[in-house]
Amino acid sequence: MKALTNINASSILDAVTAAQQARNNGQTVFFSGGGTDLLQQIKDGTVDADVIINLRNIADSRQIVRNATSTNIGGLITLDELSKSNQVSNVLTEAAASIATPQIRNVATLAGNITQRPWCWYYRNGFNCYKAGGNKCFSVTGENQQHAIFGGGPSFIVHPSDTAPALVALNASFVVTGPAGERELSAADFFVLPKQNPQRENSLVEGELLSSINIPEAPPNTISGYHKVMDRESWTHAEVSVAAVLTMDGSEIRSAAIALGGVATIPWKLPPVEAFLLGKQLNPSVAREAGELAVADAQPLAKNGHKVTMTSAAVEYALLSLASA
């Protein structure tokens, strides 16, 4: 591994300025919060970096600030801190708690989890695929057991974040800071389908970083939860995950937001399921029908058809879990 220059930033603005100066000198720059994924990619050779901007000392970007209308979460909060917070919804704390191991959650950050690169074995093992700047997705005719059944083409990676589906279900917006200043994007504008840009998973441009997340205040009687199915107990990503947020009027569903992880190229919303649930009683038959509806538009590849039945069952289970909450 080649020598790297490390710069310790004292603020988000300081980090953006340092990155701009390094790029002006012709250097390749990456931001590092926890660094759990970035440093591994550098070691593996999938990332070629000259300068690392270390964000760990920016304490005010690890805070959760609530007001009457929203909650702002600093992008550098660790997943462990987030998982133990009583200031955010269950769906987000449960998603954070499901990630990797306690050691990783103590270091990894929320922004890092949202913006981590895909874990497709072709990309991670040096194949010149779309994600690595090439012009082919090797999974289409290759090993695609863990790849997307929604939103695929031309790349069929799955978005690796657990917190992202939870934030999408919570109708969060993403605050991005860069050389041009600060901008705020909805989830629909932040996450990018491969058909929009096969080399990217989000709309961050060079020199920008995800600085914080805003979550609107939930209506009264809102319940939420996160259900994750893995192929082993820890240190792995979701085969399928379901983030569910329901607002109840007694036993009747007044509003619903459902987002999937592990099965699509971005956190995948289910508008037909959400519309179906409105006005329904939360019971086993409704949950089962919602699960079936969730996979109506699934397009599995040759070796990942198991994700279709798994997704249907996971949506059903997630809703039934909220019924008993």
Image (cartoon, rainbow, N blue to C red):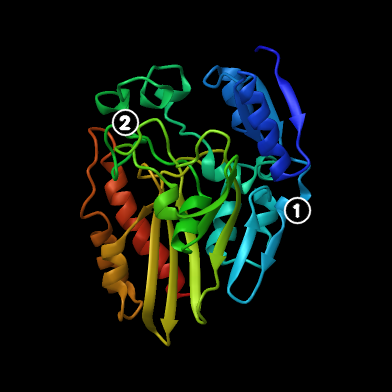
Amino acid at the residue labelled 1: Asp
* Residue 12 visible in the displayed image: yes
**Left or right, residue 283 beside residue 119:** left
Q: Residue at x 76, y 37 (%)?
A: 9
Q: Residue at x 50, y 81 (%)?
A: 221
Would you place residue 81 above or below residue 301 in this image? below
In front of the other: 177 or 273: 177
Does dot 1 land on a helix, a strand or a loop? helix
Residue 133 in the image, given as x and y percentages of width and height:
40, 21
**Left or right, residue 272 beside residue 6:** left
Residue 174 in the image, given as x and y percentages of width and height:
53, 53
The N terminus - image quarter? top right
Label 2 crowd (10 A; few <14 / some 14-19 / many >=20): many
Distance between the alpha carbons at the discs numbered 1 and 2: 41 Å
Q: Residue at x 65, y 19 (%)?
A: 25
Residue 56 in the image, given as x and y percentages of width and height:
74, 40
- Nearer mark to the viewer, of 1 and 2: 1
Would you place residue 52 above or below residue 11 in this image? above
- The residue labelled by disc 1 is 60
Q: Which mark is residue 144?
A: 2
Q: Residue at x 59, y 22 (%)?
A: 28
**Left or right, residue 134 beside residue 111:** left
Q: Which mark is residue 290?
A: none
Amino acid at the residue labelled 2: Asn
